[in-house]
Image (cartoon, rainbow, N blue to C red):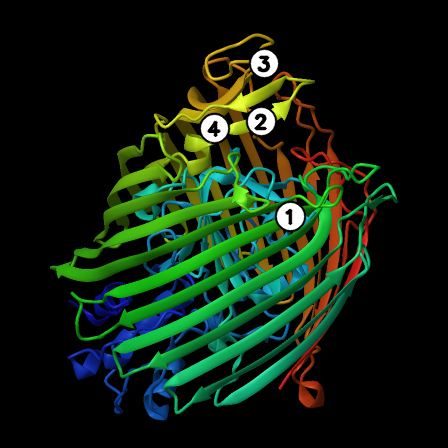
Amino acid sequence: MDCVSRGLRMDVLLRPPVFPGTASQGALRQDPDPACQRAVWTTTLHRRLHMLSRQPTPPCSTAPGSAQWSHIPDGHNRRIAADRGALTHAAARIPRRLLSAAMLLCLGQSAVAQSATAAPDAVKLDAITVTATKTEQDIDVVPESVSVVTREQLRQRQPQAVGEVLRDLPNVDVGGGPRAVGQTVSIRGIGDDRILFLLDGARQNFSRGHNARLFVEPDLLRRVEVIRGPASALWGSGAIGGVIALETVDAADLLAPGQDFGGRVKTGYQDVNGQWMGAAAAYGRIDERFDWLVDLTYREAGDIRQGDGEDLANSGFERLSGLAKGTWNIDAANRLSFSYLGFNEDGEVPSNPQTPAAADGANLVDRTTRQDNFLLRYDYEDPDNNLLAPSLVLYRNRTDITEQRKRDDRRDATELTTTGFDLRNTSRFAFGDDLFQILTYGVEYYEDETESTRDGAPRESFPDGKTEVTGVYIQNEILLGERLTLIPGLRWDSFTSSAAAPGLEDNDDSAWSPKIGANLKVTDWLSFQASYNEAFRAPSVSELFVSGVHFTCGPGCQNLFVPNPDLKPEHARNKELGLRLFRQDLLTPGDVGRLRASVFRNDVTDFIERRVQVAFRPVPGNPGPGGVSTSDNVSDARLDGFEIGAVYEAPRWFAGLAYAQTRGDDENTDEPLASVSPDEWITRLGLRFPAWGVELGWRGRFVSAQDRVPAGIEPSERFDVQDIWLTWSPAGQLAGLSIDLGVDNLFDADYTPFQSALKAPGRNIKASLRYAF
């Protein structure tokens, strides 16, 4: 095998497995042929920069000097340490035009950000996904549709809630209104109770009607990955619509090269709700073996001003969030890390935060939302061992919501605790020069425990219970020659749900989740993708065992919940085709252009829905008038659509355009699904002034009316929302200072988004000031 092939194969075979939320750590092994050491390193670096085949590869060099390869955590990318002579020689052989390429900015599925302070000739890397395959891969290589939101984009957005991070992605919609505690997410017409949420690789399984799924401070995030489409072959139950994986910051993201201790302070203001925020962090590294981080963020906000000029009553909040992390590099191969993420928010809101507050305050509650996430991770990475690279993550998450009704002091408490682990290994094999395999296999176990009370007594409408899930999975990334990659995978899950109340049967079942994907590189600038994925969602404890009163209908009349422990899991079968184009030096030297398109069809069977039967006579389950409500597998659904996005990136300006469309129908009734979002255009345009450390930009969302709705659902009108932003990170004597300015809803549009009963916020002028030392 020649040196070029060695470089490509080493890049693939020696890339270590990575948990979502973990900085990738690996070592580039020194090639046994000294004449090829530098060419192998250079070739590997080329692939990191922009897929080896897209640029000429330098010939094998035999220049003197030896390289010692090691790994140092640095955000999500490797930092390669080498002696000065070898590094200089290798860098000199990289084509200059590659070094001048600007980083791709995120738009839709091509999500990569560029720092405003970067020089035009800085080397930039493509976005990497670790969620799609549980190994580190370029998003252009994986068959799935993946978007990555980077920390730089989070900075541009200055979000108050996670929902604001996601709304600029194609076929991803945020509903439920502007109160963060009530915001919900849908992907390709699938609601967030059928989407898997991950936080630093740990499952977040909290789900309660009219409430957000996840509570986390956006200022503590470094990146977000979104997989559109089913993903149970690796991730198990819940991933029918896709996966949303959030990663928190590490000390390595904040420490400058050679820095052993640092800190930062930040303050900000947003005028749409009079919100003030303050944050402080300290971080450091001890003896190059242990790094640590402590980060606190506080926000206080009043009522949100809507586009019509009226305030949304009872939408203010007070929030305190904190993150503590530590990583111990025990030796060259063993690493142990720990993290704690806490969230506490208080506010006086309606019991259903997706609705207006009643004029007399009858539906108001004092609500405290608390979430605690504990995580312990162990990684073993020996660069000389391609068969053994195990990783283990242990986690325990607790979500606790307490609500005290204002009118009579009734107190409801709801708690969900998830405890679990994910243990996996990655083995890498080479068979000749044209067949390489990356085999990932593992076992996952988690347990959900729900507990709820009303004035200290068990609450039937949110029953106490437990769900246990055990899954085993295997995936094989097969590289056939230089052009074709196949990725088959299979997972089996067994799950059991039981109620704490006596007299209810357990729900036991199992599910297989296969997948197969392919990426065919036709030319250096054109590739095609095809994939088939199955997914499932096990019924929740509340769907299985809910009982008690649903609602009252007059004196002596009440509708009762009836448990259904015989529910079957929902299943999804997704077919998808894709096309991707990439071109460097498209219009001018140093620029890049990219286009990504995908078309999909997702067939979902055994949809679980709550059926409400109103009857003013006795019926089974209710001896009196009022009827019954129960969950059942009642319908099948078909969703199809497409996404297309184009990005152009030059050293001093950028532009992007994306369009997304989904159609969904209930195959039993032939009516449209109520959860499908309207068609949408997403645009970005901006300028960079590297010498000044300035970037400014404009983004727009142009959303069509949604009139494909079932009977009883209110259609929505079209609307346009446009934002502008400016970031400034000066150098010299002001180094460490960052100022971010922005205006959301620039023209103060008055609109009500689809799947929302509340109007959206009006114009929001916001600013933040940060200083790092």
Query: Which one is in front in this view, the residue at disc 4 or the one at disc 2?
Result: 2
Q: Nearer the viewer, residue 526 or 379?
A: 379
Residue 590 visible from this viewpoint = no
Does label 1 or label 2 sit earlier along the sequence? 1
Left or right of 562? Residue 549 is: right
Query: Which one is in front in this view, the residue at disc 4 or the one at disc 1?
Result: 1
Q: Give amino acid for label 4.
A: Asp
Residue corresponding to mark 4 = 640
Looking at the rendered structure, the secondary structure element under dot 4 is strand
Residue corresponding to mark 3 = 614
Percent of width and height locating residue 722:
75, 48
Percent of width and height locating residue 192:
51, 40
Query: Which one is in front in this view, the residue at disc 3 or the one at disc 4?
Result: 3
Residue corresponding to mark 2 = 550
Above or below, 557 against 527 in this view is: above
Does label 4 or label 1 sit earlier along the sequence? 1
Q: Quadrant location of the C terminus?
A: bottom right
Q: Nearer the viewer, residue 245 or 587?
A: 245
Residue corresponding to mark 1 = 403
Does label 3 or label 4 sit earlier along the sequence? 3
What is the spatial separation of the Cα atoms under label 1 and label 3, in whole angstroms? 29 Å
What is the spatial separation of the Cα atoms under label 4 and label 1, in whole angstroms? 40 Å
Q: Give amino acid for label 1.
A: Glu
Does label 4 or label 2 sit earlier along the sequence? 2
Left or right of 37? Residue 231 is: right
Looking at the rendered structure, the secondary structure element under dot 3 is loop
Q: Give amino acid for label 2.
A: His
What is the spatial separation of the Cα atoms under label 3 and label 2, in whole angstroms? 11 Å
Q: Give amino acid for label 3.
A: Val
Q: Which residue occupies 53% across, 43% down?
A: 457
